[in-house]
């Protein structure tokens, strides 16, 4: 699925989950193998990113700032401020909406 992220009414990123190094099944299996888990535990995968991140944008402000530091020598994207609005929408490859946050 694609993860579309809008910040302050502007598209911030639209990365696709397919290029993940490890699938969620592998992340959950590793977490269950290496430590005790209970029902309801949340497992985070980290930011959704793609090799062509410069074209697709980012899913994480810290990632965007790190890219700017590497490319331009300094970060220009600010951190979130009080009142900023972020919307995250997943979208299937056929265009159907997935869950949103």
Image (cartoon, helix red, strand yellow):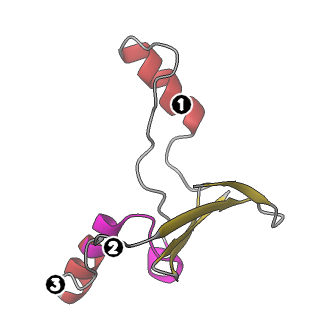
Q: Is residue 34 left or right of residue 14?
A: left
Most foreground residue, 73 or 12: 12
Magenta residues, start to end: 52-65
Q: Nearer the viewer, residue 62 or 23?
A: 62
Residue 64: numbered disc: 2
Is 26 on the left-hand or right-hand side of 44?
right
Q: Is residue 47 magenta?
A: no
Q: CA distance from mark 2 to mark 1?
A: 26 Å
Residue lying at the far left of the rendered structure: 73
Q: Earlier in the sequence, mark 2 or mark 1?
A: 1
Front disc: 1 or 3: 3
The x and y percentages for residue 35 are 36, 14
Secondary structure mostly seen in magenta is helix
In the picture, the disc for residue 26 is 1
Residue at the spot 26% in from the left edge and 72% down from the top edge: 79
Position of residue 28 measured from the top left corner of the image (x, y, whole percent): 51, 27
């Amino acid at each position: 699925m694609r993860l579309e992220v809008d910040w302050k009414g502007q598209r911030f990123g639209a990365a696709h989950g397919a290029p993940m190094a490890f699938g969620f099944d592998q992340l959950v299996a590793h977490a269950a193998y290496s430590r005790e888990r209970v029902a309801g535990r949340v497992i985070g995968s980290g930011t959704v990113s793609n090799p062509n991140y410069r074209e697709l944008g980012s899913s994480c402000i810290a990632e965007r700032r790190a890219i700017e530091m590497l490319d331009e020598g300094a970060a220009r994207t600010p951190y979130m401020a009080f009142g900023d609005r972020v919307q995250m929408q997943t979208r299937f490859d056929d265009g159907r909406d997935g869950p949103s946050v």
